[in-house]
């Protein structure tokens, strides 16, 4: 959300942030007002978080009603926030922006009648929002939507002034591999990465973030000197950590249906950083890094990672990293200014003018 907060505040707009503090929330530091729902909930606990999720939606509605005289538009992320926001917007006649980061049912592996219900609600909101934001063109198919005037594709491009430094191929020491994000125990290959790298000479593995796999990673770090835990990091601090790596990681196992349409920030971050990306064969980021030669797409196994480690060289890492940065400068260097600051802001202006 920082990308939108910065773009709006640069134009003199007042921005409030409503978020769920699960213990590690990184609220946008530049927001004028921050309102946090403080209820413990475990990432990935699914139905066990149902009561907390109901409380969160009630908190969203109550906070929006309390702020209603100050609100010009509401920007809601994903279905667990959007339904409450849509309810408020329709009652108070405020423009509603539905920003879909991830397909709700696919991300949570929901099946059966519940899947049909969630899909129907999500599709209804996407079709009836004043502005719907999708992360990639492929999401039209995933959400069963058709291009429309009110739908805008906004790629997950970071708005960062970071200046990438080329990889020093003559630097002594091991290859440094970095991961930044939620430490998920399944579908992201982190358990395979940990097993492949722990105790292996010639490589150090760095983790930034938190999640269900944290305890296992911390235990491995106590046992092996080449596993480094950075803990929860702000996005800026996380990018600085990754900038000191030789390679970044973004695995997306196809056991998670949503990964067939993955449009992750990790893909764009590796371009910004000028660091090659390790991803998964058969996924959109995996296909792109293979085609563009800015990284590698591996099979979903420990052996595939070990085989890559056995053949990785700093020279090839540097070559693919330089190619990644070149693509950033060609295609995305001015994306934030063009899309967030101009196109998105103009859309909001139009909506609020008609309000």
Image (cartoon, rainbow, N blue to C red):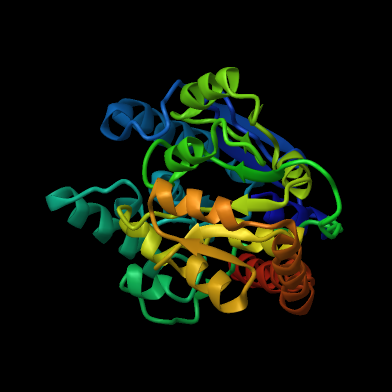
188 w.r.t. 292: above or below: above
For residue 116, what is the image quadrant? bottom left
Q: Is residue 275 visible?
A: yes
Picture coordinates of residue 59, whole percent (x, y): 46, 31
- Which residue is more in the foreground, 316 or 79? 316
Q: Residue at x 72, y 75 (%)?
A: 327
Q: Residue at x 45, y 81 (%)?
A: 148
The residue sitting at 58% across, 36% down in the picture is 200
- Residue 129 lies, with reference to residue 246, above or below; the image says below
In the rendered picture of this protein, how many numbered marks are placed on residues?
Answer: 0
- In the rendering, at what x and y percent does residue 192 appear? 43, 42
- In the image, residue 32 lies at what x, y percent? 75, 39
Residue 311 location (% of width, % of height) = 59, 57
Q: Is residue 28 left or right of residue 113?
A: right
Q: Nearer the viewer, residue 131 or 293?
A: 293
Query: Observer-nearest residue: 200 or 53?
Result: 200
Q: Which of these two is toward me, 259 or 315? A: 315
Residue at (56, 19) in percent of width and height: 223
Placement of 113 over or under 325, stated as above or below: above
Q: Quadrant of residue 67?
A: top right
* 47 in relation to 137, above or below: above
Residue 99 appearing in the image: no
Q: Quadrant of the C terminus?
A: bottom right
Q: Quadrant of residue 123?
A: bottom left
In the image: residue 28, left or right of residue 355 = right
């Amino acid at each position: 959300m920082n990308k939108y907060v910065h773009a709006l505040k640069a134009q003199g707009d007042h921005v409030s942030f409503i978020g769920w503090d699960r213990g590690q929330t990184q609220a946008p530091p530049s927001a004028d007002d921050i309102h946090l729902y403080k209820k413990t909930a475990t990432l990935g606990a699914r139905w066990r978080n149902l009561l907390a999720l109901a409380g969160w939606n009630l908190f969203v509605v109550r906070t929006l009603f309390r702020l209603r005289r100050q609100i010009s538009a509401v920007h809601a992320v994903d279905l667990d926030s959007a339904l409450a926001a849509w309810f408020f917007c329709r009652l108070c006649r405020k423009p509603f922006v539905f920003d879909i980061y991830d397909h709700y049912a696919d991300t949570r592996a929901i099946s059966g009648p519940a899947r049909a219900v969630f899909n129907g609600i999500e599709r209804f909101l996407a079709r009836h929002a004043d502005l719907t934001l999708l992360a990639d063109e492929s999401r039209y198919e995933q959400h069963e939507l058709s291009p429309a005037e009110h739908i805008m594709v906004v790629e997950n491009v970071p708005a960062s002034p970071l200046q990438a430094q080329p990889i020093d191929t003559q630097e002594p020491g091991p290859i440094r591999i970095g991961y930044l994000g939620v430490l998920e125990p399944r579908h992201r290959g982190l358990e395979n990465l940990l097993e492949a790298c722990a105790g292996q000479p010639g490589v150090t593995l760095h983790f930034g973030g938190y999640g269900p796999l944290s305890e296992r990673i911390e235990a491995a770090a106590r046992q092996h000197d080449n596993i480094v835990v950075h803990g929860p990091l702000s996005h800026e601090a996380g990018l600085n950590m990754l900038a000191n790596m030789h390679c970044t990681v973004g695995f997306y196992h196809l056991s998670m249906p949503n990964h067939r349409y993955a449009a992750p920030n990790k893909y764009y971050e590796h371009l910004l950083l000028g660091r090659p990306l390790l991803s998964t064969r058969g996924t959109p980021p995996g296909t792109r890094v293979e085609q563009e030669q800015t990284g590698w797409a591996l099979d979903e196994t420990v052996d595939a990672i070990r085989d890559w480690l056995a053949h990785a060289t700093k020279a090839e890492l540097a070559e693919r990293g330089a190619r990644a940065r070149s693509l950033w400068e060609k295609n995305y260097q001015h994306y934030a200014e063009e899309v967030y600051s101009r196109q998105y802001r103009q859309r909001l202006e139009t909506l609020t003018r008609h309000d």
